[in-house]
Image (cartoon, rainbow, N blue to C red):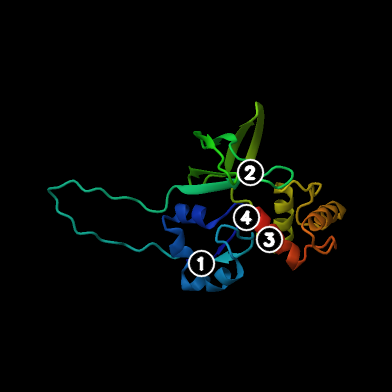
Amino acid sequence: MPDYTIAPGDCIVSLAEEHGLLWESIWNHPNNAALKAKREDPNVLLPGDSLFIPDKRLKEQQKSTDQTHKFVRLGTPAKVRLRLLDFERKPRKNVQYSATVDGTRTEGTSDADGMIEFYAKPNAREVELILTENGRREEHRLQLGQMDPADSLSGVQRRLHNLGYDCGGEDGTLGEATRAALRAFQQERQLPVTGEPDEATQSALRELHGS
C-alpha cells in the first residue's frame, strides 16, 4: 500500500478505525520509525506528513462449532480528555458538563484538576460541550483531530487560541495578532518576550496545553 499523506482532521485512531487496524499496529510499524521520532504524539500530526498503513493480516481462531463464542473488537471507542481552566489558569473543578458526539450524550462533573473524560468514536469530528457553573451556562463546539504539532506555526496558534490568547484568525501566518498573543503568553510564563514561536515557547505551550 502506498504511503498515506496526512490531511487536516486526520489522526492515528481515526485512520486505524477506517482501515480496520489497531492504532499501535500503524504507529509502531518499522516503516513509520522516522515519523514516530519526529512527532511526539501519534494523534497530533501535521497535514502533509507521510504515514505507512500496513495491510490487514488474517488471524485464525480455532473454535468448536457446537458452542457460542464471543469475540471482542479492540481499539474502540476512543477516549477524549479535556481540562477546564479559568482565566488565571487554575483548574475549574466541579463544573457540570454535557458532551454530545454523533448524537450520543455523556454527562458528568469535572474533577479537582479540572479534567473531564468521555468516550467517542475514533472517527468523530466534533464535540458539542455544554458547561454549567454557578447557574451560568456555556456552549462550545470543539473540533477533534484538528490540533497540529506544537513545532508548527498553526499548532502554536491553535494552542494559544485554546488558552485564551487571540491570534486574530491568523492560521499558519505569523502576523501582528499572533506576535501580540505570543508576547502576552511569554510574559505570563516569564519567558523572554520576543513575539517569536521559539523552542522555549513551544515547550511551555505543550506543557500548559497538555499536548
C-alpha span from label 3 to label 2: 20 Å
Comparing 18 with 204, the one in front is: 204
| Identity of the residue furthest to the front in this view | 112
Side of 182 relative to 82 (left or right): right
Give the structural element (helix, strand or loop) at label 2.
loop
Comparing 73 with 92, the one in front is: 92
Earlier residue among tags 3 and 2: 2
Earlier residue among tags 4 and 3: 3
Q: The disc labelled 3 sits on which kind of residue? A: Ala
Quickly name the residue at label 3: 150
Residue at left offset 53%, top offset 47%: 80
Give the vertical position of 60 relative to 107 (above or below).
below
User: In the image, which is nearer the foreground, mark 2 or mark 1?
Assistant: 2
Q: The disc labelled 1 sits on which kind of residue? A: Phe
C-alpha span from label 4 to label 1: 27 Å
Q: The disc labelled 2 sits on which kind of residue? A: Leu
Residue at left offset 79%, top offset 51%: 170
- Residue 139 seen in render: yes
Q: Quadrant of residue 211?
A: bottom right
- Across and down, in percent, residue 40 comes to 59, 65
Q: Which mark is residue 52?
A: 1
Q: The disc labelled 4 sits on which kind of residue? A: Gly
Quickly name the residue at label 4: 210
C-alpha span from label 2 to label 1: 35 Å
User: In the image, which is nearer the foreground, mark 4 or mark 3?
Assistant: 4
Earlier residue among tags 1 and 3: 1
Quickly name the residue at label 2: 84
| Identity of the residue furthest to the right in this view | 176
Earlier residue among tags 4 and 1: 1
Residue at left offset 44%, top offset 47%: 77
